[in-house]
Amino acid sequence: MGPVLDDMNIFSGNGSAQLASDVANSVGIPLSQATVGKWSNDEVRVQLQENVRGKDVFFFQSFPGEVSDRLMELWLMIDAAKRASAGRITVVIPWYPYSKQERKFRGREPISARLVADLTVAAGAQRIVTMDLHEGAIQGFFDIPMDHLPHLPVFLDVFRNEGLTGENAVIVAPDAGAVERATEVAQRLGCGIAVIFKRHPEGDVERAEVVETVGDIKGKRALLVDDFMLGGSTLVNAAEEVRKAGATEVRACVTHAIMSGQATERITNSGISTLYTTDTLPPRPDMPPNIKVVSVAPLLGEVVRCIHEDRSVSKLLGEIESDKTI
């Protein structure tokens, strides 16, 4: 742990208190205090309890639920710091809200992810830190510096320590959108790759049906990889298909476990022996026993310190990546 940094504050909204506290501890400062609640008429109330004049201020917020309230908390905290003459305002949102709505899929729909970006900048954010975006193009929604952190440094050592490497393992993309991610993981672990193609029934876009599985799976340990899990149907259906294809074991990995709807029950009763995820979203109290959470706090702590010291985040990530090579 480094020396206490008197010119930095780390605050948290109600969606990320534990993660922000862990990051502050890794940096070497206490988590700054703020009142973040509601008035009796349900309006969000915010007051920063510490002096931020001229300081490097970091706001953490996650979105496990009540997304609209959490966004309003974030925007009001940013505005409070701006009006209190903060030196620089950096917003850390490891899971970017509305990231599934990054483009128009049908007529008369908004581009919600873009609007979130516009409002965050309008509130006064001067830099954004996020992790493993659902669509990399979201980076282009911001005209301020944005650091997009990779997921691999968090997971690679875990996979290696548990023997998910070499010819006896296969990395599986649960849908066509995860092929690039699965290919990258497979290359780093020296594994083969398989792809499951799915479709969403008309009128039920959150449910997934498997159409075809391509790749050599029989007799191998399978690892399904994706960026996030919402209700869990994609992973559970994919796990069932991988079992049918002859895998000896099925594990899965998602950076962001939203766990909405019946996700807890689905994962508990699925054929997935272990689901690896991170604390970009706070773990639920009823988290199934087959879920293993890997903390991103050490990585975020390094990034926060790097930003504060005006060092290159890209260089830092390059150094971390080089340390994780086979």
Image (tube, rainbow, N blue to C red):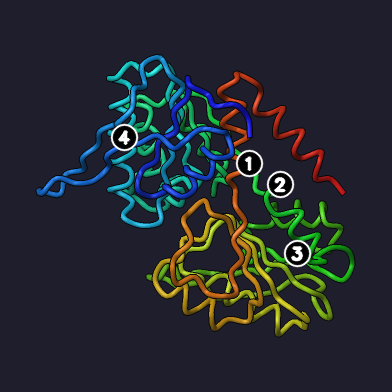
Residue at the spot x=77%, y=33% of the render? 319
Front of the two marks 3 and 2: 2
Q: Secondary structure at mark 3?
A: strand
Q: Which residue is mark 2?
A: 153
Disc 2 marks which amino acid?
Pro
Q: Secondary structure at mark 2?
A: helix
> Does residue 326 appear to the left or right of 115 in the view shown?
right
Mark 4 Cα shell of 10 Å, populated few (<14), some (14-19), many (≥20): many
Q: Are marks 1 and 2 in contact (CB under 8 Å)?
A: yes
Disc 4 marks which amino acid?
Trp
**Separation of disc 1 and disc 4 at Cα?**
25 Å
The location of residue 91, given as percent across then percent down, is 44, 33
Earlier-in-chain disc, 1 versus 4: 4
Mark 1 Cα shell of 10 Å, populated few (<14), some (14-19), many (≥20): some
Choose between 111 and 88: the one closer to the eye.
88
Say which quadrant the N terminus sits in.
Answer: top right
Residue at the spot x=47%, y=79% of the render? 265
What label does residue 75 carry, if any? 4
Q: Secondary structure at mark 4?
A: helix
Earlier-in-chain disc, 3 versus 4: 4
Image height check: is 151 above or below 287? above
Q: Which residue is mark 3?
A: 171
**Separation of disc 1 and disc 2 at Cα?**
8 Å
Image height check: is 222 above or below 193? below
Q: Which residue is mark 1?
A: 299
Choose between 190 and 105: the one closer to the eye.
190
Mark 2 Cα shell of 10 Å, populated few (<14), some (14-19), many (≥20): some
Front of the two marks 3 and 4: 4
Front of the two marks 1 and 2: 1
